[in-house]
Image (cartoon, grey):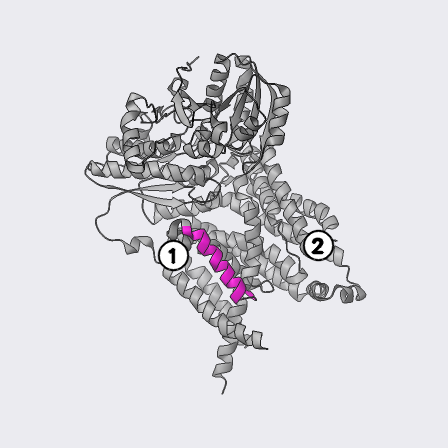
Amino acid sequence: MTAKKTYHGRAPAAFALIVAGVAFLSTPAAAQRSGAEPFKIGVILALTGAGAGLGIPERSGALLAEKIINSKGGVNGTPIQLVIEDDGSNPDGAISKANSLIHREKVSALIGSSQTASTVAIGGLTDPLKMPQVALSGLGPAIERDRKCVLHVAPSQALNAKAILEYASSIGAKKLGALYDSGYGTVVYNELRKLSDAYGIAFVATEKFEISATDTTTQAAKIRAAQPDAIVVVGVTGVPIRSLRQLQMKQTIIAANGLASYETVKSMGDAADNVVFPEFLVGEDPLPHQAEFVKLFHKEYGRFPKILEAVGWDAVHVILAAFKKADVGANNEKVCEAIRSTFKGDMTDYDFSADDLNGIKLSNIVYSKLVAGQFTRLPFQAKEK
Amino acid sequence: MKASRSLVILLSIAVCVALPPFLPRHFVDLLVFAGIYTVAGLGVGLLLGQCGIANLGQIVFYAIGAYATAYLTVYVQAPAMVGFVVGMLISAALALTIGWPILRLTGYFLALATLAMGIVANALFFEWDWLTGGTLGIGGIPKLQIFSFVLDTPLRFYYLVLGVVAICLLLAHNLIRSRTGLALRAMRDSQDAAISLAVNPRALRTRIFILSALLGSVAGSLFAHYGGFANVQSFGIEKSINFLLIPVLGGATSLIGVVVGALFIAVVPELLSQFGGLHQILFGVALIGVVVLMPAGLTGALAEVWRRSAEGARP
């Protein structure tokens, strides 16, 4: 009886509290701001959830771009404002966020998302409006075929696969082992299989693991038993590399660029040494056109940028260049037309008029090796065939 | 009391119909998701509220509906209705095949069995990329069209979803009020007594499980047409837990509770997202708050407020 009485007393108060809270929170963010309207760019990233490892560094690059661009006078004198939203690594959330950015915040263009599923979801909204969208994830052939104003600054899966095979071929590896995750890894591995014959390379052992796996020793042991000449690792965590090294495997490990981050290196410890990465940006030894960005980034954050920070930076500059070319007030179609051209980014050079909607060339890829936790640029250079 | 209840229902319907055109587009978008979640959550709610079964596998049928629609409309260019029907047929067949053996279990064991079903299905959606598109999923699903009227805005789609929700709630209401509904509650409250009255619990549970699967499939097909894509990332265990939370938060034995629970799941995370990385913690705190302070769900608490105010007004 006493318990029932307590519940009766609390329920109305709790209900009222929730209603009041919801009413308070539903006040639009826009209504709380004032001042002149800047040039708004919507950014949707995976800042929480499984893709947070991608979204957080991408946000660092984008925010630095916003700061530097505004310090130089913005776009044609108008300051830019990035309206950043978190899709929670969930494509359903990405739709709501994109609707909010497009129709409530009235952004002129969208950047995002960090993951392919959310990018595809957002593309369903930007495509009918012909609104420029710069994705930070790789896209797929269906999207590249149908949506011509959704560009991407990350390398395509096919390019990742070619870059890996080029290096494997250069060291004379004929028998490869592959450890890849069930997400991004599977897509890259499918491309590796398609292209391997052309390089005269065979996969003698291939093992898949869950993205969230914390131990891949069993899979690594199977790879070891096949005695490959080199091992390809495609994933977003250092777990598989650690497993391979724990089994005392001395073969060369070639890791896809998703693993080329300082966080991953830190998590791998000594196991990271001598792993080779086909990537774009070696902060410790940048290419001449990357030096300014690396310097600015290091000054701002006290660390070197890698590919994820660089794509965030480049995405903002790609959009800005298109609006400068087409004019800030230009309609979406004109901006889309302007954006589909070549662009010299700090990460790499793009050709957004190419069929794969980014036109990154194999020759733009640089190779690095980890030595005592530092990325060291290798002299090897892949060539277009 | 009955007249005032009817008035509240009529007023609610009027608000649902008249208000959305005046709401911001992104809010209507959230209402569309709330409607879709209501349909899927209703299936879970019927199982939980009427049969006492905690179903953590609703995502399987939601995904089947979405993939059936995606595959048939994009690759086979079939009409939208074919996607809905095929999704429902596959879901019903699977629910019968899986439900018949696992519905012998009860309590935590049954909940764990449905959870396992969701985990296995998620792994298959990843692996069967020839069918589901794997990590890349299937994009470019056409917008629904009624004759030449294309449902290509959140507001247009909202009214379709509203109609579907209304029909589902009406059918569920009739089911609960029928002899079957009585048998379900008898079975939930005292299975032995129900058996002595010639109720076959396993057959009855399987029928409701199939009905729940059908609702999940319809919701999945609606989602695919609305979002324009079907991707394995939308069909994780997290979503299954959300579908179970819908009746738990709203009130498992109340149909209106399912609607309220779906609104909570769709709208509250969005409102909290302005707090950045903290929003997931705040959402968790809100969930705990509702479950601890309102064991009968949000509608249970509302009914209590109503009852107390009615008692207070009495001379």
Task: Tell me what residue is drawn at x 50 percent, y 36 percent.
Answer: B139
Q: Which mark is residue B207?
A: 2
In the rendered image, the quadrant that contains the N terminus of chain A is bottom right
> Mark 2, residues whose alpha carbon is within 10 Å: few (<14), some, or many (≥20)?
some
User: Is the same chain shared between marks 1 and 2?
Assistant: yes
Q: Nearer the viewer, residue A259 or B156?
A: A259
Q: Is residue A95 above or below residue A219?
A: below
Q: Secondary structure at mark 1?
A: loop
Q: Is residue A338 above or below residue A90?
A: above
Residue B226 x/y as whole percent? 49, 45
Q: Nearer the viewer, residue A276 or A170?
A: A276
Q: Is residue B244 visible?
A: yes
Task: Tell me what residue is drawn at x 59 percent, y 38 percent.
Answer: B125
Membership of A325 in magenta stretch: no
The image quadrant of residue B73 is: top right
What amino acid is found at the position of numbered circle 1 in the picture? Leu
Residue A220 x/y as whole percent? 60, 27
What amino acid is found at the position of numbered circle 2 in the picture? Arg
Residue contact between numbered discs 1 and 2, judged by CB atoms under 8 Å? no
The image quadrant of residue B128 is: top right
| Residue under numbered circle 1 | B23
Looking at the image, is mark 1 or mark 2 earlier in the sequence?
1
- Residues in magenta? B278-297
